[in-house]
Every structure is written in C-alpha cells, then in structure tokens.
Image (cartoon, helix red, strand yellow):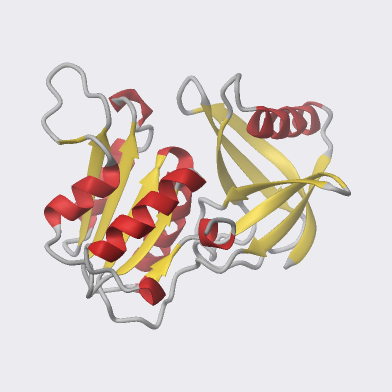
Amino acid sequence: MQTLNAVVTEIKPLTEFVYHVTLKPEQPAQFLAGQYLQLVLGEKDKRAFSIASKPSLQNSLELHIGAGAADSYAMQALEHIKQAHANNQSVLLEVGLGSAHLQQSSPMPIVLLAGGTGFSYVKSIAEQLEESGFDQPVLLYWGVKVESALYAKAEMEAWAKRNAKFQFIPVIETPEGDWSGHTGFVHKAVMQDIVSLEPYQVYMAGRFDMIGIVRDDFIEHGAVRENMHADAFAFIK
C-alpha cells in the first residue's frame, strides 16, 4: 500500500447519481489493474473506491462514485472531495489495495462482470489488457437497472470495435422502450451465453450481496473458485 496526497482536478456528473472524479497524486501512484484506493476522511474513517484508470497512468487516478441521497458512505466521500476541490486542498489516499487484481500471466479467456459502478473495476482491467496486447477472448458484462445508467456505453462499444477479441455485453434489469439486448440479472446473462465457466478467469465487482450470489451460481455453472476474483470475497462467507 502507498499513502499519498492528491489534488482533485475534476468532478463531473456521469448520470444523476454517478460522478467522475480525477485525482492528480503528488507522486506517481503504484497499483495493479483491478485494485482499489481508500479515501482517508479520518484516522478511523476510510472509504474504498475502485480505481477506474489503468496502472500506467500513474499521475492521474480516475474514480466513478455512485452517490445517491440514500448512500451516505459515498455521498460523504464525494462531499469531502468537493470541499477539497473548492478550497484547492489535497486529499489523502491509500493506493494499491485489494487482491482481486488482474492475473496478467494467465492465458485463460476472461469474463469481466460489473454491477452498477462496479464498472470502474473492470474498466481498469480492460484497459490494461488492451495496453498489454492480450490476445485471449475477453467478455465484459455490465449490468445496470436502466439503460441511462450505462454512462460509458459508447466508450465500451468503441473499445470492443478496436479489439476483435473483446466483447462488450450490456445487461438491463428493467428495460424500457426498444431495448433489444440482454435483460434481467447480469450474471444470468453470462450463464445464458457461456455453456461452462470452467475454462475462464472471472473478475467481478458489485454489491456484496450480489457477489455472493454470483459466486455460488457461477461455481454451479462450472467456474473454478481459484479462478474467480472479487475483493468482496474477503468480507462475505
């Protein structure tokens, strides 16, 4: 883990409840794709957020913070960031946390699964894979409640278009209008598309209660526990 100060260079809304935050660390940040950082609000108050940027961008850290009115954990963190930005002050970070980072040496095909702002976690891994010239199949599934929550849909479609081995599969839980893609729970779409998860490395991020269900269902669908990666595993049974 690396402790450092960072200047807040940008805060912009991605949706009504999700904000894109850019931080410029005062020294190069060291982390692996898929790791997270903690925003230090106090000695015993640290808020964890996935790093959305790739590790080679050591001087610019990207966060996606979902901060609805009912989510005090994220909302208080966002207010801390906004206050620092307004007062031209730095924020204190602990960078390079988590064990669910990309296993770069594995030749296995990959499933990246995200629920909501868990997308930031898989985005970092996807960008790292692209940069490193990874040539195994990569399937990125992003599940949200409504289509408007797919704030990086155009970016991911462009990403998949650039890379023949990469696929982007958005999943809408409650579709409206003329949506013709996958619907329902995101992990059910994975199991619908893939006969068995046994040959895959699986990386996933989302609500802890969601990840527990996904883990159990995926194991029944052939996934090997040692090839499944989620920081939530450290906190759930």
Location of residue 165 in the rendering, given as x and y in whole percent from the top left corner: 19, 64
Q: Nearer the viewer, residue 29 or 169?
A: 169
Location of residue 216 in the rendering, given as x and y in whole percent from the top left corner: 35, 58
Say if 47 sits above or below 31 in the image.
above
At x 34% / y 28%, what residue is drawn?
A: 145
Say if 204 sits above or below 148 in the image.
below
Q: Residue at the top extreme? A: 177
At x 53% / y 60%, what residue is drawn?
A: 231
Q: Is residue 141 left or right of residue 12?
A: left
Location of residue 73 in the rendering, given as x and y in whole percent from the top left corner: 67, 34
Q: Is residue 2 left or right of residue 147?
A: right
Q: Residue at the right extreme? A: 43
Question: Across the whole image, how many numbered discs are drawn on residues?
Answer: 0
Q: Nearer the viewer, residue 141 or 214?
A: 214
Quadrant into which the N terminus falls: bottom right
Picture quadrant where residue 157 is located:
top left
Q: Nearer the viewer, residue 89 or 67?
A: 67
At x 66% / y 45%, what residue is drawn?
A: 23
Say if 142 sits above or below 226 in the image.
above
At x 71% / y 35%, what residue is drawn?
A: 77
Location of residue 171 in the rendering, given as x and y in whole percent from the top left corner: 25, 38
